[in-house]
Amino acid sequence: MMWAMTKRTPTGAAVLQPQVTRAITEAVFDELALHGYGRLSMEAVAKRAEVGKSALYRRWPSKQDMVVAALSEFSVPLAEVEDTGSLRGDLLATVTAVHDWLTHPRFATILPDLTAEAVRNPALSEAIAATIGEPRRALGATTLRRAVDRGELPADFDVEIALDLVAAPVYWRLSVRRAEVGPDYLERLVDHLLRALQC
């Protein structure tokens, strides 16, 4: 006799529970802060998150994928800037967002180690660029193209150069010079950016 087969909705371990994913992501940041990328292990993350290692491997096939996913989930949304109605307002919102990203207590702790590790690890560097750098730049490009639509920038302006100009000074001041950003620094930076973009 032939019996009809019915599909069951996956339950239990087959379902990726959001609260477990959040706990793992928090554990990834904690382990990165404490031990750095090189010494981070799937075992330590699982222990800190109070889950089995299988919960990690159901989500990501490797340590690199897990770390990059956690960093991307945190970093990319911070590059979203609402339309302020003017290029100056958008630039100020953008450099403020870059500042807040680089000075976030958790991210600022792990950034130096990740930067050094990416130099030694081309695969990690490429993954970070593909899942964090490029999506953040795409959001930045959208912000700049709004200025084109408003007639504040020419249609043929160099988007790539403009994106470098906007983000680089904040990164250089905070991460390379290790200097503070005073109350009016971002405002003065935007004034210079506007002149650089010939607006």
Image (cartoon, rainbow, N blue to C red):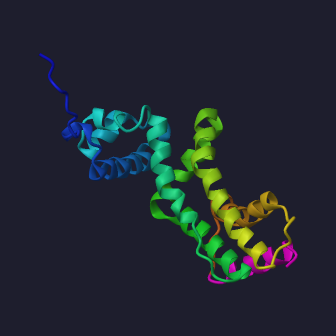
Residues in magenta? 183-199
Mark count: 0
**Residue 56 located within the stretch drawn in magenta:** no
| Residue 57 placement, left or right of 182 | left
The residue nearer to you, when weighing 93 against 157, is: 157
Residue at the location (57% across, 62% down)?
102
Indicate whether residue 191 is drawn in magenta.
yes
Q: Residue at x 27, y 48 (%)?
A: 17
Name the image quarter holding the C terminus.
Answer: bottom right
Give 48 or 22, whichever is nearer the viewer: 22
Depicted 175 relative to depicted 145: above or below: above
Query: Where does the N terminus fall, quadrant-wise?
Result: top left
- 13 to the left or right of 45: left
**Place of residue 45 in the rendered image (x, y in percent of width and height, measured from the top left):** 34, 41
The x, y position of residue 153, in whole percent, is: 82, 74
**Residue 33 image position (x, y, % from top left):** 43, 50
Image vertical order of residue 192 relative to residue 58, above or below: below
Q: Quadrant of residue 183?
A: bottom right
Dominant SS type (magenta) = helix
Of all residues shown, which one is farthest toward the left?
Answer: 1
Q: Give the x, y percent position of residue 182.
A: 63, 79
In this picture, residue 90 sits left or right of residue 127: right
Taking the image as shown, residue 39 lies to the left or right of residue 86, namely left
List the single residue furthest toward the front: 1
- Residue found 22% across the figure and 37% down from its top: 13
Residue shown at the point (73%, 79%) measured from the top left: 87
